Image: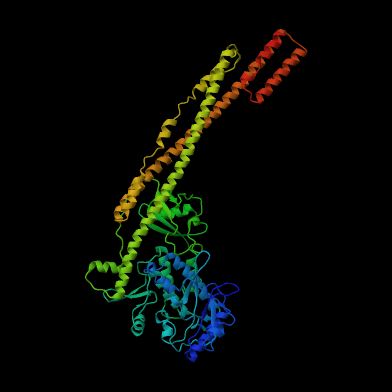
Amino acid sequence: MRFQDTEEQIAIKQCRQELSERSKERWCLEIQIMKRLDHVNVVAAREVPEGMQRMVATNDLPLLAMEYCQGGDLRKYLNLFENCCGMREGSVLILLRDISLALTYLHKKRIIHRDLKPENIVLQQGEKRLIHKIIDLGYAKELDQSSLCTSFVGTLQYLAPELIERQKYTVTVDYWSFGTLVVECIIGYRPFLPTWQPVPWHNKLMHKQNDDIVVYEDLSGEVRFSKHLPQPNHLNSLLLEKMERWLQLMLKWSPKERGKNHKAKPSDCFSQLEIILQLKLVHVLNMMSAKILSYSVSDDETVADLQLRIEKDTDIPAANQELLLEAGLALEPNGLATQCAIDYTELDGRRTDSPLVFLFDRSSCSYEPQFTPRTLPENIRFVQADPCHLLAYSPLRRTCSQAWHTIRSLKEDWQRLQQGQKAAIMSLLRHNSSLSKQKNEMVSMHQRLMAKLDFFTTSLHIDMDKYQEQTATGIGIISQKRHVDRFSPDFPFPSICSDQRCPGNGQELVHLVVQAVQFYEKKLRDFYTHLSKTAVCRQRVMELLPKVEGVVQKMAESEQVLMSLQEKRQRELWNLLKVACVRTHDVSGCHGPEVDHCNRYIRGTRVCQDSHLNVKNVNVRKLRQYHNH
């Protein structure tokens, strides 16, 4: 229902009419506890609307009003077919953060939940991601009350052993339930013999070692104990190893040892979990092998540091590595590696396309598919070995789930390779755009330089014709001509322009994508063939780019030399005029106003020189008129 004032949706919880006195006490305790809790990961209590108690209540027990979570409970989410082999990595990490914060809050309030299970966790869509909230504190117990269990509470599969054995317990019972729930979220089913009855289940589980986190019955009927999380699941290898060690703390049989790691500081399980959750993970897809490499990076680690770690795992020298984002942007070695790390506090964990960094080898243009044998799940291998073996419903269902997960993994591997190809093409387009800009700059500068060279050569020839008699005075116009002749317009421009036209065929890519759906290995061969062509085109562009830049640089240098020669020619031209004026003065023997007039003219010509006026604008006829006068 909704509040009339705020339009907020609320949930109303009501007790059944026929309840034992013990259940009534537990109900009243739940309401009491809920009203004094305030945490984002614990469902908040609300005031019961006025008059609601009289309209709805069928007994004297009070109603419980709570915030309404539209996402349903975690069990509903786990039952989705897409989660048949566990939740996505991001979803698992978000769940770990939310529920660990909620349990820490409850334990600080001296409250033990005792019945933590998927049905008691609800989902609410937040601004950026799903938020998990704990509900149903009906079995919660305060630590200042008697902590001696006198009856079975909760669901057996999630209960700690001491609760089943009716022994004294502490907050560590929630550790066991939390660990069991987390394993189920990772692999898709409960970790300890989920189909067994309570008595044989407990008797068999007593033989579990402290570091065993999974006990299961294989298809041959043999019970196996494992210290590792079974495949398939969605966790990367780095996170998988850390989660296995953490789950070994949470699922210890002894309640006194559970949740503690005496070799680490801090030693409590939630501090250890926080270290895992604070990891900044970078996932790198090696386009040479189609394998994903996962790295935990620190805040001050650079991309160059990350490349050294990649070199150890791939044998690709750091100098030859190119790390591209999906948009085709290359990571600079001096940049921080955290710029490409995944932040699940900002990212919806349900996304299937987690951000990747794509690794290419600059030194190689030939990409060959590497068909390493794919490790199939245990049930699939069993069916392959004995196809006629009849399976019961539960193992048959799990086998179908593993088969579907394997097929989906192939599809997602292909999609990731396509993302890498897209990154390579986007990078090629960026470099080709830079090459086009350099080419246009080269054409423009070539035309500008040729125009200046023609102007300078023409001016030089005119000067030589007009002032040939002045060559004996030391003016080096002829030597300038010889120097300029070396700057011939024979630039490597035409060949460079033609080299940038790389061959390509878009229909081949479409044909490749259509056929890729049928056979994964054939897809991989065709894909790497096309990726090799992209790499060849990109390498040619990268080779042409510095050549064009070099030509542009040479043109700029030639332009500077040409301009300096032009300035030198202008200076010598004005020196020649000055000499002419002085000689005219010496021959005529002029004094007085005539000399002053000549000096003023010379100063005026210097002003013209400073203003970079063309030599054609100099009115030499005035000088001749003055001489005749």
Q: Position of residue 337 (x, y in %)?
A: 49, 55
Q: Is residue 308 above or below residue 473?
A: below
Q: Is residue 64 left or right of residue 311?
A: right
Q: Is residue 31 above or below residue 406?
A: below
Q: Is residue 459 left or right of residue 577?
A: left
| Location of residue 272 in the rendering, given as x and y in whole percent from the top left corner | 48, 70
**Residue at 43% across, 84% down:** 162
Q: Nearer the viewer, residue 614 or 296?
A: 614
Quick check: 106 above or below 362?
below
Q: Residue furthest front?
A: 55
Q: x and y percent of residue 253 in the render?
A: 41, 79
Among the 4 quarters of the image, the one containing residue 599: top right
Residue at the limit of the structure toward the left, as seen here: 388
Front-lying residue, 123 or 561: 123
Q: In the displayed image of the protein, which residue is found farthest to the right?
A: 592
What's the residue at 25%, 68% (across, down)? 383
Measured from the top left, where is residue 160 in percent x and y?
Answer: 43, 81
Can residue 155 be seen in this snapshot? yes
Display colour scheme: rainbow
Asked if residue 320 shows in the view, the reply is: no
Quadrant that contains the C terminus: top right
Please give the count of numbered marks on the rendered protein: 0
Is residue 577 positioned above or below 66 on the image? above
